[in-house]
Every structure is written in structure tokens, then in C-alpha cells.
Image (spheres, rainbow, N blue to C red):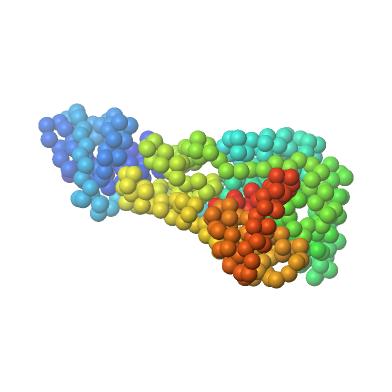
Amino acid sequence: MDNKELWQSVLAQMQFHVSKANFATWFQNTEIISIEDKKVTISVPNAFSKEWLSNKYNKLILKAIHDIDDKVKDLSFIINPYSSKKILNKILIQNEKEETEQLRFEEFKVNKETNLNPKYTFDNFVVGSFNELAHAASLAVSESPGFTYNPLFIYGGVGLGKTHLIQAIGNKINEDSKKKKIKYISSEKFVSGIVAAIRSNSIESFKSNLSSIDVLIIDDIQFIAGKNKTQEEFFHAFNSLYEKNKQIILSSDRPPNAIPELEERLRSRFEGGMIADVSLPDYETRLVILKQKLQEKNIELPEEILDYVANNVKKNIRELEGALNRLLLYSKTNNILDLETVKKLLKGFIFSPFDVVNCKKIIDTVSKFYNLDDKNIFDVTRRKEVVKPRQVAMFLLRKELKFSFPAIARKFGGKDHTTAIYAYNKILQENEENNKLTEELNLIKQRIYSG
Ligand code: ADP
Ligand code: MG
């Protein structure tokens, strides 16, 4: 048996002891380069692999070799970043294939009845001060649906765990009682369902379907704003479920009172239960989330790298996951995982406020937040719907970007910078007196800074 064959059979053995993910991470591009004096020397592609293999897998590897060649008593590892690059390992390729297939399978294992994705659970949901209330309320609802908080309304920015949380409730209820009829539906699907039902004259059966549900979960409910027919139907569905103590769970990118063009009667229904927000996790929680995701995948990374990611990827949890996946994918195919490489790889995930926030960004975000079309914020008009967003935009240009008042005035068609001063002071003062405005400003800022 030559060195290559020996190593292949060791690898085949190691597979039984190591998870696929770990196997791929630590054994890729390794080979036996010599056997001398009872000592086997294994070449590894980097210091990182060396540390791992010699600390964690030394015994296992030695035993596997010893089982084949009992003269061998010792192992050593040397780093050889060049020669090993091209080693192709059948086992690895095979594993990788299986793994991606498995991954894909998991991704799409959405329950056909409930539309819930089983990957969203309370078990893998990390709790910190940023989402404590939302988590506690969700847990309470999952324990006695229909009887604690109804409706439960979770709101917050993109990628902060709303979908995860509201699906976790559904999955938990489903696990506890198979009899309960649970439906998770995105608000877009809900809208298109109603539109289709109206078109095909089947709104009655659509309604009776809805009324047989025990737990109705609608994600991103803000999208029904401005869609009058949908709001009307939803209002009736809401009432009929509510009266029967059926649980209603909603998520939104903002609180009910900040959703423009939401019918008053719906707003007051939404406010009639529990409203809880999810916000941004702090450094410690980001670190815990990273570790939790690695644990799920059964992979470990050095503290130094985790610390760097947690310190720098701050936008939201989805980005944090994205950054991590990027690193894992890269390390799997290239075997390089030093901090310098990590920094390069994560460039797109890391930003300073000054990179992304500019005048256009602020104006666009404010316009969008208040449902104004692109250019309308610049309209010369005293209409309230335009004046307020314009004042908010002026305020933020001053506050966030330190624009001068004349510069702000120029942006808005120019004549008189006293208008900009007036707007700034007005919003500043109202911000102190009016909680709703404060909340709106916070949400707008959250969006501006989250890319
Ligand atoms: P949202 O619906 O608010 O846009 P998601 O629920 O889709 O955000 O979350 C984005 C990603 O981050 C998902 O993969 C989700 O599993 C993960 N995630 C969010 N919050 C947490 C958390 N607290 N603990 C663990 N993973 C989380
Ligand atoms: Mg979501």
C-alpha cells in the first residue's frame, strides 16, 4: 500500500468519527508525505488545519493508521500550502454533493398544510435584550393560542427575526397539538389569494377556508396597506376568528400606527392585542448567534475570526448569517481561513455609516417610508402628506449628515434657507412631544443605516 492509498483508507475511517462538515473543513487537501522511523508526516494546507488536526484528531488519525500499519507510533503535521492545492479527494467531492443535496432538501421541507418551514424553532432562536419581549410574547402565545395575546403583532426592520419568530410559534403549536389548523401566509399571497377569489367568484369559499383556521399567521402585513378590498375582507376574517378565540399573529416592518393607508378600524384591531418589537442585536448577542449557527452546522471557527465578524457585521441577523456562510463556503473550497482573508471576504458586509448614507439615501428612504412616489417629496405644495416627509428629510439631512441649512434648501429647490431651519426646529420639537414621530424617526434611521 502506498502513502496515497494508506491516506485514502484513513480518510475513509475518519468519516465515521467526524461530521461531514468537519470532515470537509479539516481533511481537505491533506496527504501523507512521508513515513519514516515509525513516524507519519502529514501535510496540511495551513496553520489553522494543523492546529485542529494535531489537537483534536491526532489520536483518531494515529489509531486509523496504526490499524493498517502497526509500526507507526507517531504523527507530525507540516504546513504546505502549495503542493496540496490540487489534491482531489473522491470522498470529499462525494460528501459535498450529498451535503448540498441535504441542505437543499432541508430548505424546501416546507409543510404543505401549514406552509411552515420546520427550520424555524424556538430552540434555535437566540434571545437578547433586543428581542426579549417579542420572544416572551411569542412563547406565551404558543403555549395557549387564542387566550393570551390576540392578536400578537411583531414588528421591526429587515432580517431581525420576525419571520423566524412567528413561524416558531406555528411550529410549536403544531408540535403540541396536531389537531390545530395552522396557516402561515405572506401578506402578498394573502392579497393575491383575495384578488383571485374575487375574480373567480369564489370569495365565499375563500372566507370559509379562512374561518376554519385555528392559528392564522400573516407575515409582513404592512403590504395590505392601501389595498382596500383586501383590507375589508381581512377585517371580516379577523373579526370572525377573533370572536371564536382563534389566534392571529402578524408581523410588520413597523408598528400599526406608522403604517400609512391602513384603515382605522384595522389599526385599532392590531393595537388591541400585544405589540412587540425586534431590534438590532448587540456585539455579545451577535457572537452567540454566530456560535449557535456554527453549532447547528457542526463546525468550529477560531475565536479571533468570530470576534471579527461579530464586531463588524452589524446590519442585521440575516447579514450575519450571510457573512458566516460566505466564510464557510470559502474555507471549504480554498482551505484558507486566516483573518486577512476573512477581512477581504467580508468587505461587502461591512460598512461605515459614511459609506452608505448620503443625501439621496435619506430622501429616498423617507419618501418610501411615507409612501411618496420618487419625485413627489420635492413638489411645491402645502399638502400635509408631502410637507411632513419633506420636513423629516430636511431634519435628517441636518442631523445625520450635518448639511448646512442653505445646502438643504438648495436640495429642495432652493430659495430660502429659513424653510430648512423651520423644518429642523419643528421636527426637533415634535420629536420631544410626540412618541409616534419619535418611533417613525427611529424606524427611518434604522432603514437608512441598514443599507
Ligand atoms: P425578518 O423576517 O425579520 O426579515 P428573518 O426571520 O427572516 O427576519 O431572519 C433572518 C435570518 O436570521 C433567518 O435565517 C433567521 O433564522 C435568522 N435569525 C433571526 N433572528 C434570529 C435569532 N434571534 N436567533 C437565531 N437566528 C435568527
Ligand atoms: Mg420576514
Q: Is residue 129 left or right of residue 214?
A: left
Q: Is residue 230 above or below residue 23?
A: below
Question: Which residue sits at x=58%, y=35%?
Answer: 128
Residue 79, image x, y percentages: 21, 42
Residue 176 visible: no
For the residue pair 281 and 335, the one nearer the viewer reads as 281
Image position of 451 (left or right of 264): left
Q: Where is residue 411, by image quadrant?
A: bottom right
- Estimate the x, y position of residue 101 in percent, counting from the top left: 47, 53
| 79 or 421: nearer the viewer | 421
Residue at horizontal 42%, vertical 38%?
307
Position of residue 170 in the picture relative to residue 49 (left or right)? right
Quadrant of image for the N terminus: top left
Q: Of 67 and 293, which appears nearest the observer?
A: 293
In the rendered image, residue 86, in percent from the top left (x then y), is placed at 25, 54
> What residue is at 79 percent from the left and 65 percent from the top?
197
* Foreground of the two, 236 or 387: 387
Q: Is residue 63 visible?
A: yes
